Amino acid sequence: MAISFSGLVSGLDTSSWVDAFVSVRQADVTKLQTQLASQKSTKTTLNDTRSTVSSLRTAIEKLTDAKFGGSFDLFSKSNAVSSNEEVFTATAGNGKGEVLGEVVLATHSDAGLFGIQVYTNLTNPVDPTSGIPAYSAPVQFYQTYAGISTVKVPEVTLPQGSMYSIVITNLGSSSIDYLCETAGDYSWVKFQPGLALEQSFAYNNSDGWSDLYEDGMCLRIKAHTRTLSGPVTVSAPGSFKAVSASYKQINLSWSAVSGVSGYEIYRKEKGGSYKKLGNTSYGTTSYKDGSAQYGVTYTYKVDK
């Protein structure tokens, strides 16, 4: 016959104490098991997301490899001489002039040094540099951390309906991860970028400018403008002078005109028609014609 004593003959109900203690410990274990299950579920979700993003990256890399033969990679390869560019048309003013004052760029890379140039009045929609450079030298911007950066630039006046471009050049980093917009259709999300022909271009030394529309993508380069009170109206450059500096060089100068993004210089020989010599940015009001020939009469003009 078995004999049991509750409380170890002390008079205390230790059995109920032990039962209560075991119950409390079991509640702690159950709570920890629930937390562990939640963490495992979160880890599974993150792994699934990482796998989906990796598939998206692989798809984009295949597109760029097919176009550029591996020389242009949105995620890992952008040579120090590469440039990316967006073409815009000034229409936000609804008939009024616009002034560009900010440029937005987006990358996945830290410590990137970029040059920013604005070309106005483009003459060739497939050549982003066919217009007049707004700055005598590109505006430099250092992006400390990856992400989206809004860069203030010297203001550029844009007549309504004119085409202009923003060219972003990598000034020395071994690689830059540029952000782009591209189509993607997955079970949990669908991407549909706003693409247009002759909108977004990439440049490399071997192929020159390539339209990324053919690859179903565009680079994330944006322009911020403000609307003026009326149309852009400018007067002709004044105080125009042409001075012979040597037997084969003529120096030209003129007074600055407000509301322009640059100047175009033309020359004609006696009895001939005007031919464009070159252009300057809005801040440069002089030009050296080093191709003049001794004994030939020239006529010059400067257009805004």
Image (tube, rainbow, N blue to C red):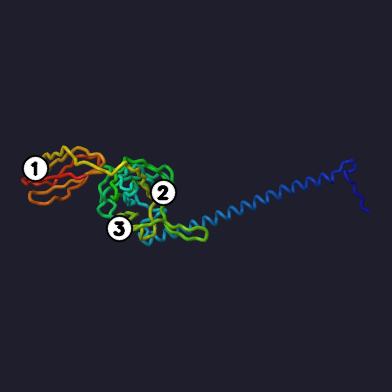
Closer to the camera: disc 2 or disc 3? 2
Q: Residues within 10 Å of mark 2 (few under 14, many from 20)?
A: many
Q: Residue at x 18, y 46 (%)?
A: 265
Residue type at tag 1: Tyr
The answer to whether 194 appears left or right of 155 in the picture is right
- Rounded to the nearest angstrom, the CA distance separating label 1 from label 2 is 51 Å
Q: Residue at x 25, y 53 (%)?
A: 123
The answer to whether 23 appears left or right of 148 in the picture is right
Local SS, label 3: loop
Label whose residue precedes the other's in the sequence (1 or 3): 3
Query: To which residue does mark 1 refer?
Result: 247
- Rounded to the nearest angstrom, the CA distance separating label 2 from label 3 is 23 Å
Q: Residues within 10 Å of mark 1 (few under 14, many from 20)?
A: few
Give residue 240's quadrant in the image: top left
Query: To which residue does mark 3 refer?
Result: 207
Query: To which residue does mark 2 refer?
Result: 107
